[in-house]
Structure formats: C-alpha cells, structure tokens
C-alpha cells in the first residue's frame, strides 16, 4: 500500500528537554535534583493516576506541587512559582523538526505524533515547539488509553489520521516501539541522533533531514 501518513514520536525524535533551563528554574527553589523531582512526579502519577484530559492535568499538577511543598516545607512564594510553571517552555524542537514536518505536508501526507507521554497536554507542547500547525493528530498514551509498543496505540494513531497502519511511515527513538510499529504493518525507522550518518539498510536514521529521501524511496 502507498504511504499516506507519517507518524513521529515526540521525545528524542521531534524534541528534547531543556534540562539546563529547567535546572535554572528549580535549583533556587527546590532542594532536590531534577531527577529527584521527576522520581517524585512518577510516584505521584502512580498514586493518583496520570491525567487523561487538560482539566485533569491542572488538578494533577496542583496536587503534586502542593504535596511537594508540604513535604519539603517550602514557602508560599515558591508554591506560587511552582503552581504557575508551564513545563512546555522546556520542550524544545530539534533544528530539523519543522523542516521534516513541512516535507511531509508538501508530499501530501497526513502528519501524526504518537507519544508515550504521561500528560494530556501533548498538543500544547507541540504548539510551544512551534510545530502544532503542522500536526493533524497528536496521540498521548494517557489520553488514548494505549501505549507503544501495544498494537492498539499504533492502530488508534493511524485511525485518527484516516489511514491504515500499512499506509504509515513511523519514526521513533526506541527499538521496542519501532518493532511494535512494524508488527502492525507500518514502515518504521529508529532515530538515533548520536550517529553521524544514516544506516537506512538497517532501518536507522541519524536525524529527520533524511525524510525526503525516505519518502522518495517509498514512492512519495
């Protein structure tokens, strides 16, 4: 079947997390490392459940920051800063991200994002990255009720784009997620941004600049 859509993972494929800027915000306010905060965030999610909507996400963060401040004895000013934090400011698109999405759109393909992101605000993060206008369907695992590499996750993403899995090109930075895509019939490549060159015959790309070549190989 011809390729009619391209589906991307977000983290490690379309974006990175600006740890330096995040540390600049948290270090003067919270006596924990970023990783310790993240561990507490994961534990909080396991305890109360990760949000499935924007409204649930607001309550999720409010409860998390209140619990953290209460536990660490942090003052009202820090509490207000944390409650006002928009994490999407730290989600940064790679330099080749917008160009790759534009290439897909110019080829007449639908564009999707399928992420195992555990928050509901995937669309907001894509908008903050400056690419929300180029994405037709954004599917976060917590919202769609399925996570990669489960077949259902890929099937939902394809359905949201109005195509069959066999009509999708899929790119992810995790081998298990790439294998899951192939298992449902998608053409899939692993993105490894640590590499200096592509290894297309092995199903690996070093960046998204190769997308036009991949599409040409696939007849698009």
Image: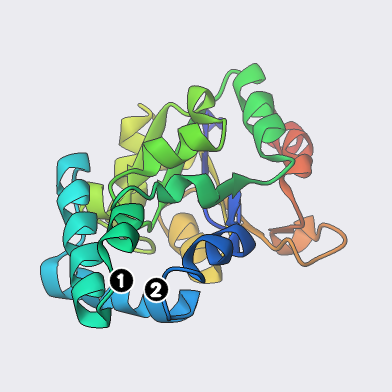
Task: Give residue 39's quadrant in the image.
Answer: bottom left
Picture residue at 28% right of the left edge, 68% below the top: 75
Residue 101 percent across, percent down from the top left: 62, 31
Few, some or many residues within 10 Å of mark 1 (<14, 14–19, 20+): some
Task: Give residue 129's quadrant in the image.
Answer: top right
Q: Is residue 5 above or below residue 107?
A: below
Quickly name the residue at label 2.
38
**What is the CA distance from the residue labelled 1 to the residue labelled 2?**
5 Å
In front here: 40 or 77? 77
Residue 220 seen anywhere in this rendered image of the structure? no
Picture residue at 41% right of the left edge, 52% below the top: 115
Residue 9 percent across, percent down from the top left: 51, 51
In front here: 158 or 64? 64
Residue 86 percent across, percent down from the top left: 40, 46
Q: Secondary structure at mark 1?
A: helix
Quickly name the residue at label 1.
41
Q: Secondary structure at mark 2?
A: helix
In front here: 105 or 164? 105
Task: Give residue 51's quadrant in the image.
Answer: bottom left
Residue 210 seen anywhere in this rendered image of the structure? yes
Q: Quadrant of the C terminus?
A: top right
Picture residue at 29% right of the left edge, 43% below the top: 156
Few, some or many residues within 10 Å of mark 2 (<14, 14–19, 20+): few
């Amino acid at each position: 079947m011809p390729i009619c859509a391209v589906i991307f993972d977000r983290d490690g494929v379309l974006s990175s997390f600006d740890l330096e800027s995040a540390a600049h915000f948290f270090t003067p306010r919270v006596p924990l490392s970023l990783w310790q905060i993240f561990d507490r965030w994961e534990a909080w999610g396991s305890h109360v459940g990760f949000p499935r909507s924007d409204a649930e996400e607001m309550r999720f963060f409010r409860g998390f920051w209140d619990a953290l401040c209460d536990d660490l004895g942090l003052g009202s000013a820090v509490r207000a800063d944390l409650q006002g934090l928009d994490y999407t400011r730290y989600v940064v698109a790679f330099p080749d991200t917008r160009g790759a999405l534009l290439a897909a759109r110019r080829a007449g393909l639908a564009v999707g994002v399928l992420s195992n992101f555990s928050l509901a605000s995937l669309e907001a993060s894509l908008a903050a990255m400056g690419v929300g206008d180029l994405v037709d369907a954004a599917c976060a695992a917590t919202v769609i009720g399925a996570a990669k590499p489960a077949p259902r996750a890929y099937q939902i993403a394809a359905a949201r784009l109005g195509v069959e899995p066999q009509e999708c090109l899929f790119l992810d930075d995790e081998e298990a997620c790439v294998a899951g895509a192939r298992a449902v019939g998608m053409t899939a490549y692993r993105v490894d941004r640590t590499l200096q060159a592509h290894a297309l015959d092995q199903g690996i790309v070093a960046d998204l600049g190769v997308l036009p070549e991949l599409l040409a190989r696939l007849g698009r």
